[in-house]
Image (cartoon, rainbow, N blue to C red):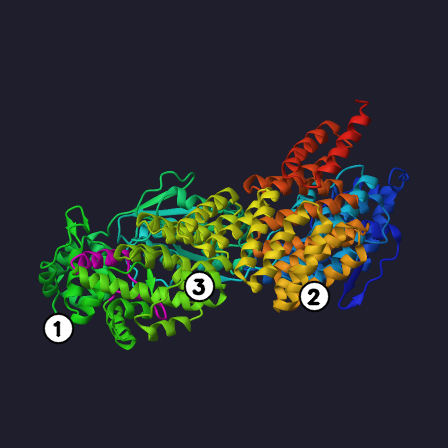
Amino acid sequence: MFRILGPLSVTSAGRELAITAGRDRVVLAMLLLRPGRIVAVAELIDAVWEDRPPTTARGQLQTCISRLRRTLPPGLILTDPAGYGISVDETGLDSAEFARLVSAAGTAGGPDDARKLLREALELWRGPALAGINSPTVRRQAAVLDEQVAAVLEDRIELDLAGGHDRDLVAELTGLVERFPLRERMRMQLMLCLYRVGRQADALAEYRRTEELFREELGIEPGKALRDLHRRILTGSVADTQPAVPVDGVPRAVGDFTGREELVARLLGAIGADGPADPQVRVLDGMAGSGKTTLAVHLAGLVRERFPDARLFIDLHGHSESAPVEPAAALITLLRQLGIPAERIPDDPDERMQLWHTELARRRALVVLDNAASTAQVTPLLPTSGRVLVLVTSRRRLVGLDAVRPESLSVLSEREAVALLARIAGDRVDAEPAAAAEVVRRCGCLPLAIRLAGARLAHRPRWRVADLVRRLGESALPELAAEDRTVASAFAVTYGQLPDRAQRLFRLLGLHPAERFGALSVAALGDLPLVDALDVLDDLVDVHLVDEPEPDRYQLHDLVRQYAATLAAHIAPGERDAALSGLIDLHLHATARINRPGENDNALGDYPADTPLRPELVSLAVADPQWLERQRPDLIGLVRSAARIGPAERAWQLGRANWRYLHERSHLDDLIAVLSLARTIAEAASDIRGVAVCSNYLASGYYRMGRHEEALQMLDESVELSRQLRSPRGERRNRGNRIGVLMRLGRIEEALKEAVWYYRAEERDGNAHGLSSRLINVLIPTTALGRHEEALRLARRALLAAVESGDDRRLANTLGLLGQIRRELGHTAAAERLLRAALRLALRVNYRVGEWESRNELGRLALDRGRYEEAVAHHMTAVELSRERGAHPAVVTSSNDLAAALLAGGDRAGARELRLHVLSLVRRTVIPFEHARALAGLADCVVAEDPAAARRYWQQALELFERMRVPQRWPVRRRLAELDDAEGLT
């Protein structure tokens, strides 16, 4: 056994063979560096004697070879007219075994197997290759091995990082970067590791050390990849740190899939035995019922082992009663399938899409996008990198998708259709070939119709196939046709055999606005006891008119839904309205019962005051922890149905009652869509109160999304309508909500006036409980305007009121504000005591907003004291907290503060990068104060190298600060004056 990954070592039969002569060791090393190949005599002489070989060099080389032959087992040394070689297999040489293990890792079935193989390979490494042999020629070639080993070590660490072993790697990587100081990839891995374990400040410090080392040692900047990681750590855009957990959301494939052999073979060949090397998109289009979804799921089952990390499925509702799923909403569903927590999913659609692309890039994933409506709907969901296969199904040809090869599904051939019927219904089909051919012809050879007809035949063992033909001839549904071939008969035969109560409930399901529904809503719709509703649903599941994809969750296939809707069109208006009224009543009262406890007194008048029609169903719904989440995708349909039967108040109340859940769970897209619809319904019905209420709560969605102008417009409308209604309480609520929006828009003096009005209105009303929070409303703009002594007096009053209220969150807020004022007055010791008390209280009651405010303000205090690393750490934590909450404006504020701390600590490049990032954020969100801070901070970053650019940035910032009349304008004025003095201007 020869070992060269470390000092040269030779063993035979378990004993060490001593190769002591220096020249012999050089010659043997040269041969082992190229096993199985001839090494030229001239190369060997150069390796032994470098540039000064003696005249007897060839003879002395032969002597070395002879000694090696005597020491080594016979037959290993090879002689050739051109030189010498050594014959050794890969098990006899550690470098060959190393190469074999590394190659095997590259084709391993999964990351765990690859990691194990790389660890085995690295265990062969005992130190620098051929250590102790000082021949320059040997050292140059051994360095290649050392580089290979180091690269494999980095690959193994990459797999460990992907597996979530971050904490275990910190110590190892710290040692490795000391051993390999100029390897950028290891530096990147250490920075990423530190970031993932919450040591963001250490990650940034590691970058600064790397930057200094490269400048001193090499005279260059770090590479683009390292700089990019530094930027992403600063901006918080580093990919998810958790290991990819295998996910399988694709439905089970049918066991009797039939036909389409040529298409399946072609698709499997295109996908490849190991899956695609790059993203691959396959589109399956065709008419309704042609088996697109069945084929996609079947294909997914055949290739599932090629995509071990994730297999996802989503119905995009491109052709159904409900509106197509918006891409932004689809991304939420797909990211949640991957296990991404709701609070980590960004509100901004572009950032959400970026997170989706990042998650897919690190997985071998299969994604089925079922029932797509259009190219515009699908495009944002497609991957940009990674070994990902996407299967798209649609009734429409998606001609706008680039570099995608569509497969248009026709109906089955008659042979395939009869074979499918036989697999479902059995031997009777083979016994009556003519009748079987007639059945599939009347079904239009559509797979769905054949399945329904075949199931009917299978459950009637005494029927002949000819009996089914006669039954099919009795029905008609002309809109469900393929050219001259109708499929209506299959639905009609199944429906016609149902008992009366099942037929009635199936007709009523044609009214249900939800794609999926539970037994409770079916019981309410049908005015049935829950037990009876479950029995009838079981009957419908048995005959395949209803599917039960998961326990107590039911759905109708879109063609069956259309058939049910045609039946529902003939329901008497009174019965129709009563059924929908029962359904809406359940959803309205259940939602109200769940959300009402979290509302304040001013809002309780928005909820229904009547008694529910079915209290027992409402109680069961309230006890279901998933009720609101399961209801969420159907809210638009439910609100529309409520409006259809009236009164309009029930419709807008249903939207309003869902506001708290949608707001707290950050389902802002849904919040805006539902409240916009509710507002439109109220407006059409001239329901002024409904418009006022919906506009007020719609504003909260716009506010959270950073659409502040739209939020203010809604609130202004609510104020005016509340005055028309002579509702002082409504007006106070609406004007109080204006305060935060005005602050975001930089209209601080106006916000202060509104806050003072609100406080005095509450005082006149004798609302002692509300006065403490209204004082805080006055306090915030007062502080922002720099009126610190006045703010201090207000804060003391607010603190006393907060203590008396017993509300820990309000107390944490007030302590934090008091600490901010003390800091701005220069009372640093008192400020720190107050801020740390606020932080302890926020942590104790799990008040994330209060924690963010306290940590960010502690960072500002640390900066004031010159404790730059401490400031960076506080602000990094604040940025992460705000991202987790989906609080976009808070991210902007903390990022601005972090940039200031970085600049003060000497990281000018990082500060500049972060200020530019903030400017990109405020372009989407109108926050003038933070916009101005970012501009002024950017000027600070560039003034030394580009005074003209700094002047432009300060002038833009000053214009914004002057408009807001905030004290931050004075430092900017001074900087511009200093710049004038430096340039010799008057």
The residue at which mark 2 appears reads as 840
Of 549 and 405, nearer the camera is 549
Q: Nearer the viewer, mark 2 or mark 1?
A: 2
Q: Which quadrant of the rendered structure holds the C terminus? A: top right
* Residue numbers of the magenta segment: 544-571
Classify 123 as above or below 935.
below
- Find residue 762 and report its image quarter: bottom right
Q: Compare marks 2 and 1 and give the one earlier in the sequence.
A: 1
The amino acid beneath tag 2 is: Arg
Viewer-side residue, 830 vs 248: 830
Type of amino acid at the residue the image marks with label 3: Leu
Q: Is residue 565 magenta?
A: yes
**Residue type for callout 1:** Arg
Q: Which residue is mark 1?
A: 462
**Of all residues shown, which one is farthest toward the bottom?**
531
Pointer 3 residue: 604
Q: Which of 925/157 is in front?
A: 925
> Is residue 549 magenta-colored?
yes
Q: Is residue 760 visible?
A: yes
Q: Residues within 10 Å of mark 3 (few under 14, many from 20)?
A: some
In front: 770, or 281? 770
What x and y, as percent, mark residue 137? 81, 43
Quick one: SS at disc 3? helix
Mark 2 to mark 1 CA distance (whole Å): 76 Å
Q: Position of residue 17 (x, y in %)?
A: 82, 62
